Image (tube, rainbow, N blue to C red):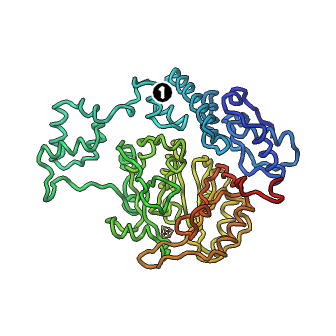
Amino acid sequence: MNLIQSSKILEAVPKLSAEELESLEESLISTKRMRDPIHVAADGRTIIDGNNRYAIVKKRKGIECPEPVVHEEVQTELEMLAFALDSAFSSGRMATKERKEQIRKSKIALAKEFEGQDKTKTQISRLLGVSRQSIGKWLGPADNGGDRSDEDPIKKAKKLSDGQKNDISVRLKAGETRNDLAGEFQAPRSYIDSIAREAGLTGEHGSNIRAEKTWYLLDEWKELPDEEHVKILNKSVKSVFNKQDTENIEWAQWSWNPVTGCRHDCPYCYARDIANRFYEQKFEPALYPARLWAPQKMPVPAKASEDISYKNVFTCSMADLFGRWVPHEWIDLVMDEVRANRQWNFLFLTKFPQRFSELENLPRNAWMGTTIDCQARVDNAEKAFAKVEHGTKWISVEPLLTPLKFKRLDLFDWVVIGGASKSSKTPAWTPPIDWIVDLHKQVRDAGCRIFYKTNSGLDGDLRIREFPWVRPDEKKLPKELKYLDMKK
Ligand code: SF4
């Protein structure tokens, strides 16, 4: 492996202490293997993530390294710097206040350079992996380069002339949909609703506005002509993630469901219970095209810099996006948004992991996961993940229904463990402690991070909550408790 270390990147990314470098070196020497690949720019040689590891493997022979991941989208020197800073920001090794502040300052300087190159705020936000709000604060309110999407939608709507408002009203009466008109006039949907109300088109007891199509079943979507797909998908709409308010999914503060429905029929499925109650189409697979806009329309909250769960989006929490029945086109639509929105981490879970291996160039913000609830799923998962080269890899052992034995847990970065919450068909279940202890040891031996859910039966300090890429806190014995030979 003969790669280039850019001096600009080495200068911009905060340095590790001698102690930290030593511990990194020790862990590489002891495992004789680099778990995470080095990331390089489009030239195939310049390192944009992994300089420290590269320096160590050059110095110490005999450490096995995976092929570097090439990022075709990272081409210019500034883009390389942006990627390196963003990766450093998400890395556990950089998780001190001072280092994060240093990275933030470098990002601000870089944002200004991008602005000088006529990049729009939206582009800068994606390149640096920060919200557009932050970019707005760093660069000031003036727009650059005509990035219309940065404009406040309400102000924009007020720019509509009386003639346009009249036109909207007439077309609503003729039965055109509110979303169509919001897209065509580049106005917020709520604004079109208000015009509809003024025109007497809505009422407490019903509406004469044609019911709007927000989701499409598999056959409905297949039957639409390609031009109609393009029209539906290009309609820009305001869309946001759902805030997760339950403690069930503490590792992600958001959920995003551009695709819903699943045909696996697991007895304990809570998603099916919710869908049967609230969705008109119940649990039948469906695409919600407007929801595809959410990752780019929604800013990353400031809290995400301290708490990674605010950056994490449980993607298709009401579906199995990789089920056999899901068309490639739907998967591609979702994965395109994942690639284009590096400011978020997208967490996937499937019971059909074979399909992951068909995906190419997965970015690190795609956390590809599979659910393993019993031993029968282990072999399949290990075979499938052995072929997945990129992204962050994880397992959700929820609910843990049998003791588990893994052969290749080292393929994964993170393991989440839990029991079963009560569903309409199944009772709540807490796994026996012996199963958990055995699994815990396997997870630690493989070097993965671990996260115990509230329904795992563990509590207090025992309920470990780590994230991939973040080094766990080391628990130390208080000095007051040290005696006999412990004092040495
Ligand atoms: S795979 Fe997940 S979403 Fe599908 S039925 Fe099973 S638990 Fe429900």
The residue beneath circle 1 is 138
Residue 299 position by quadrant: top left
Quadrant where the image shows the N terminus: top right
Left or right: 85 in relation to 4: left
446 relative to 227 in the view: left or right: right
Q: Nearer the viewer, residue 222 or 116?
A: 116
**Crowding near pointer 1: few (<14 within 10 Å), some, many (20+)?**
some
Q: Residue pushed farthest left?
A: 200
Task: Report the residue at 59% width, 60% height from top.
Answer: 369
Marker count (numbered): 1
Q: Is residue 352 visible?
A: no
Q: Residue at x 51, y 42 (%)?
A: 341
| Image height of 84 relative to 396, above or below | above
- 323 to 43, vertically: above or below: below
- The answer to whether residue 468 of the structure is visible from this angle is yes
Disc 1 marks a residue whose amino acid type is Trp
Front one among 427 and 187? 427
Q: Position of residue 126 (x, y in %)?
A: 51, 37
**What residue lies at 34% left-to-right and 69% top-to-bottom?**
277
Q: Residue at x 57, y 66 (%)?
A: 459
| Up-down relation of residue 113 to residue 85 (above or below) | above
Q: Position of residue 330 (x, y in %)?
A: 47, 55
Q: Residue 429, position in %: x, y?
A: 52, 76
The CB of the residue at mark 1 lies under 8 Å from ligand 1: no
The image quarter in which residue 377 lies: bottom right
Label 1 SS = helix
Q: Judge left or right: residue 96 versus residue 215.
A: right
* Residue 318, placed above or below residue 65: below
* Residue at the outermost top position: 116
Find residue 396 and report its horizontal and vertical position in percent: 58, 64
